[in-house]
Amino acid sequence: MAKHKIYTMSFARVYPLYVSKAEKKGRTKSEVDEIIRWLTGYTQEELEVQLEKQTNFETFLAEAPQLNPSRSFIKGVVCGVRVEDIEEPTMQEIRYLDKLMDELAKGKAMEKILRK
C-alpha cells in the first residue's frame, strides 16, 4: 500500500499554516514551537534546523529526539477520526500534533495542552 501523501510533505510547508492558524486566534508562534518541542523533544535550534532542511513529516517524527510519553493522553477527533484509534504510528503522531494545534487555536490553556 502506498504511503499517505502527508508523509512525504515537508514539515516546513505545514509549519507556517500551524503558526497562521494560531495567530488568527490570538496565540503566538512561540506557543506553536513550545507544543512541537513538547511533543517531539526537539530543542528550538533542532526544530529550526529541521525546518531549514525541509525535512518531510515522516523523517521529522522518526528523528524526533524523544516523543513525549504523555502524548498518549491526547484524545479527541481530528478530520473525523479519533486520534486514539489510529493504528498507523506515524499517522497517529501527525494527528496528535494536529489535535494539539486545534486545542491551541480554540484557546485552551498551555498547561492543559501540554497535559500538565
Image: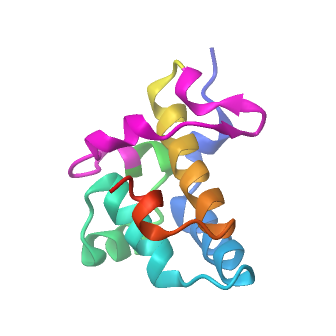
Q: Quadrant of the N terminus?
A: top right
Q: Horizontally, is 42 left or right of 85 in the view?
A: left
116 vs 85: above or below: below
In this view, the residue in front, 92 or 28, is 28
Rendered location of residue 28, percent (x, y): 55, 84
The structure residue drawn at horizontal position 28% and vertical position 47%, both measured from the top left corner, is: 68
The structure residue drawn at horizontal position 43% and vertical position 73%, both measured from the top left corner, is: 33
Q: Horizontally, is 109 left or right of 45 in the view?
A: right
30 vs 12: above or below: below
Rendered location of residue 56, percent (x, y): 49, 52
In terms of image quadrants, where is residue 81?
A: top right
Q: Residue furthest right?
A: 80
Rendered location of residue 111, percent (x, y): 40, 65
Q: Which region is colored magenta?
A: 61-86
Q: Residue furthest top?
A: 1
In this view, the residue in front, 32 or 17, is 32
In terms of image quadrants, where is residue 42?
A: bottom left
Q: Quadrant of the C terminus?
A: bottom left
- Is 71 one of the magenta-colored residues? yes
In this view, the residue in front, 97 or 88, is 97
Q: Horizontally, is 32 left or right of 14 in the view?
A: left
In terms of image quadrants, where is residue 37?
A: bottom left
Coloring basis for residues: rainbow
The structure residue drawn at horizontal position 45% and vertical position 69%, both measured from the top left corner, is: 110
Rendered location of residue 32, percent (x, y): 50, 72
- Is 44 one of the magenta-colored residues? no
- How many labels sit on residues? 0
The structure residue drawn at horizontal position 53% and vertical position 60%, both measured from the top left corner, is: 11
